[in-house]
């Protein structure tokens, strides 16, 4: 009888379903983080939208569908909702997270307060990049535990409130790796090159679509080794580390975007800190 009661207690203590590896890795529901929402079982993948944008959906452990939702930095802590198949809503909670400040001094004043001609260029380039982030291809990502694009220590983390020459600008939307000029940059997952540019702020830049709204952006490159439309394998070299654009020295800036929300790349390499 005692063994039976212990068994009952153990069953009651267990969750309704075991959380899989991807959920444990990615579920960091904070502004700039990722929320993993259980969608239940079913023969076909549910259609999920968040803030009216399509969301990555995969089957975890060959059993349950999960939505992997990118949470924008601008979202306030509290209740959020996703739409499922256009007829159902599911809630998830966003917790708070504090991001530090970073103060940078630039010699080139145009990189702090651009003149009208440079502002036109910046707006044109921003439109190109915004369009790339909004791509949503049907392909399934080859892997969600991403590889580091370069071997090197993490320098500037995601989400820093940045001040250039004392003036506040947009928060740091990616993760920086300290690496020497010319270090090869490798695709953290298989994907298609959907945009290449040499931009005012980002310098030489490559966008890679990994599938279903999961997109990587790599910038400040010295050399681009990929061409538009290339299909890169996981680990395929796409360029080399540099210091082009608004950069104070050689490093790699890596953005990860989900459903057009820039999220912390550290989550995908197991380096997230609450």
Image (tube, rainbow, N blue to C red):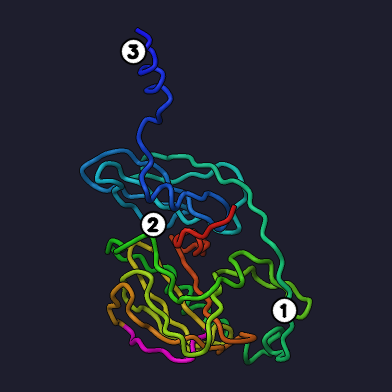
Q: Quadrant of residue 5?
A: top left
On the image, numbered disc 1 is attached to which residue?
104
| Residue displayed at 45% across by 62% down | 269
On the image, numbered disc 3 is attached to which residue?
4
Q: 10 Å neighbourhood of mark 3: few (<14), some, or many (≥20)?
A: few
Q: Nearer the viewer, residue 249 or 229?
A: 249
Q: Quadrant of residue 246?
A: bottom right
SS at mark 1 in the image: strand
Please provide percent x and percent y for residue 174.
Answer: 54, 69
Q: Earlier in the sequence, mark 3 or mark 1?
A: 3
On the image, numbered disc 2 is attached to which residue?
54
Query: Over which residues does the magenta segment extend?
Result: 220-228
| Residue displayed at 47% across by 90% down | 182
254 w.r.t. 200: above or below: above
| Label 3 vs label 1, nearer the camera | 3
Tell me, yes or no, if residue 210 can be seen here.
Answer: yes
Q: Nearer the viewer, residue 133 or 273?
A: 273
Report how far apart the C-alphas of labels 3 and 1 lie in the structure: 64 Å
Tell me, yes or no, if residue 121 can be seen here.
Answer: no
Please provide percent x and percent y for residue 273.
Answer: 58, 56
């Amino acid at each position: 009888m005692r063994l039976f009661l212990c068994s009952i207690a153990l069953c009651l203590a267990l969750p309704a379903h075991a959380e899989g590896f991807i959920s444990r890795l990615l579920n960091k529901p904070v502004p700039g983080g990722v929320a993993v929402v259980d969608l239940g079982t079913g023969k076909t993948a549910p259609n999920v939208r968040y803030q009216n944008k399509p969301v990555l959906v995969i089957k975890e452990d060959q059993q349950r569908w999960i939505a992997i939702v990118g949470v924008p930095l601008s979202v306030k802590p509290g209740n959020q909702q996703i739409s499922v198949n256009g007829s159902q809503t599911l809630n998830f909670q966003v917790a708070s997270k504090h991001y530090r400040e970073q103060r940078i001094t630039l010699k080139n004043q145009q990189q702090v307060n651009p003149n009208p001609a440079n502002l036109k260029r910046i707006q044109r380039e921003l439109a190109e990049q915004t369009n790339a982030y909004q791509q949503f291809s049907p392909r399934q990502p080859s892997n969600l535990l991403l590889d580091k694009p370069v071997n090197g220590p993490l320098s500037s983390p995601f989400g820093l409130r940045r001040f250039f020459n004392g003036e506040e600008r947009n928060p740091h939307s990616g993760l920086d790796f300290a690496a020497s000029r010319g270090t090869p940059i490798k695709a953290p997952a298989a994907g298609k090159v959907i945009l290449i540019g040499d931009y005012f702020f980002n310098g030489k830049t490559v966008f890679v679509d990994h599938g279903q709204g999961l997109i990587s952006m790599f910038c400040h490159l010295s050399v681009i080794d990929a061409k538009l439309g290339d299909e890169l394998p996981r680990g395929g070299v796409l360029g080399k580390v540099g210091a082009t654009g608004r950069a104070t020295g050689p490093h790699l800036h890596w953005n990860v975007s989900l459903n057009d929300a820039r999220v912390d790349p550290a989550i995908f390499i197991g380096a997230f800190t609450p």
